[in-house]
Amino acid sequence: MRQSNRVLQLVWAVLGSSVLGAFLVVVPRAQADGSITEDAQAAADDNPYLAPSGLSTAELVAYLDKLRLRPETIRRRPGFGAALVETAERVLADSKAEPDQVVAARVAQLDGLAILADGGDRTAADRLVKLADEHLSDGRCRVANEARFHRLESLLLRGGPIDAAEVPKLLDEVEQYFATEKPDERHERLAIAAIRLLRSLENADEVNRRSQSLGKLLVTSPARKLARYGKRLSEGGATDEQTLVGQALEIEGATVDGLPFDWKAYRGRVVLVDFWATWCGPCKAELPQLKQAYDRLHDQGFDIVGISLDRDRAALEKFLAENPLGWPTLFHEGGQHPLAEKLGVRAIPFTLLVDRMGNIVAQNLRGPAIVEHVERLLGVKP
């Protein structure tokens, strides 16, 4: 009796009381003596969201449909994403599954991998991108649209900072997606990430043009928050959100050669913090101008601190050995530097100019604009 009660509690937790009667089929199958198989009980104990063994393909698809309707508070619980993936793959393993069952399972598989990726599972994140790429041209419209959505979300939300040269292309893809898939609450994170990426563009005319174009797509959304974003964008509001200017900056970490970095030592200096990577073409194109500014103004109180977003330490070390910069370069294993994540850096090159008191006074400066601002802060005549 205790075992039966335990199983009913698990089913109740997964599906809710409203569907309990209709879905008692998900209870682990009992053996002839009324006991539950060890495998089924172990699965239930380890993860209450897993579909029990013994379900038919049709029952598994129905189970997936119920799982995907669960509220966000349930979907983010440990084990939920894994249960979606595992159940979907049981359907996909059935060579006799109906076409609509395969579609439902593929969509659920992508959804489950995305939940795991959001939870920090790098293996799931990599697998999601690979799977999405494979199905971008899927003849089944629902699968292709789902693949496009998850690919864009992965690139904009989980892929780390983006090479500035790739930003226009990605924004084009987002617009094309929303032109065919009406944005709703599910797309909120993708839309906000696209807006942040849009604000990283250097050309003000392009920002305004893209702002209005994306705004016209979002304003039709039934989700009020997205519709409000769309209205602001269509009215040229892509650049009016709060920036980092005025905030005090703190930098922690280690340089690429493993030495601890002392940010306090830079107090009283004007500092340009440069987020870059060796895989970023525009970043490397900026370096000669940065070196010229550093050589000319360093003795007068100007410094540069580089924060590399490289994933490969060896590649960074090789580049710096061949192209000495003269200023420290911070590095964090994996390419996702904590400061870049904290500040929401979405595209590189990205710069922050810090005054003598350690406060950010300008962001995303390029070329001659850097020298102009630094000279003004140092009181140096051009």
Image (cartoon, helix red, strand yellow):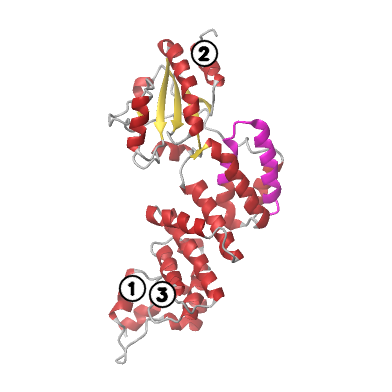
Q: Where does the image place residue 19, in percent across and percent down from the top left?
A: 51, 78
Residue 56 location, quadrant: bottom left
Tell which of 62 and 268 is nearer to you.
62
Tag 2, which secondary structure?
helix
The mark nearer the N terminus, 3 or 2, is: 3
Q: Amino acid at mark 2?
A: Glu
**Any part of residue 330 in sight:** no
Residues at marks 3 and 2, CA–CA distance in whole angstroms: 65 Å
Labels 3 & 2 near each other (Cβ < 8 A): no
Residue that label 3 marks: 51
Over which residues does the magenta segment extend? Answer: 193-222
Q: Where does the image place residue 177, in percent across and percent down from the top left?
A: 62, 53
Q: Residues within 10 Å of mark 3 (few under 14, many from 20)?
A: many
214 within the magenta span: yes
Q: Where does the image place residue 328, in percent across and percent down from the top left?
A: 36, 25
**Any part of residue 200 in sight:** yes
Q: Residue furthest bottom?
A: 32
Tag 3, which secondary structure?
loop
Q: Is residue 274 left or right of residue 233?
A: left
Can you say whether 158 is above or below 361 in the image?
below
Residues at marks 2 and 1, CA–CA distance in whole angstroms: 66 Å
Q: Amino acid at mark 1?
A: Ala
Name the residue rendered at 45%, 28% in the picture.
274
Residues at marks 3 and 1, CA–CA distance in whole angstroms: 8 Å
Image quarter in which the N terminus is found: bottom left
The mark found on residue 375 in the picture is 2
Residue that label 1 marks: 43
Q: Amino acid at mark 3?
A: Ala
The mark nearer the N terminus, 2 or 1, is: 1
Can you say whether 308 is above or below 181 in the image?
above
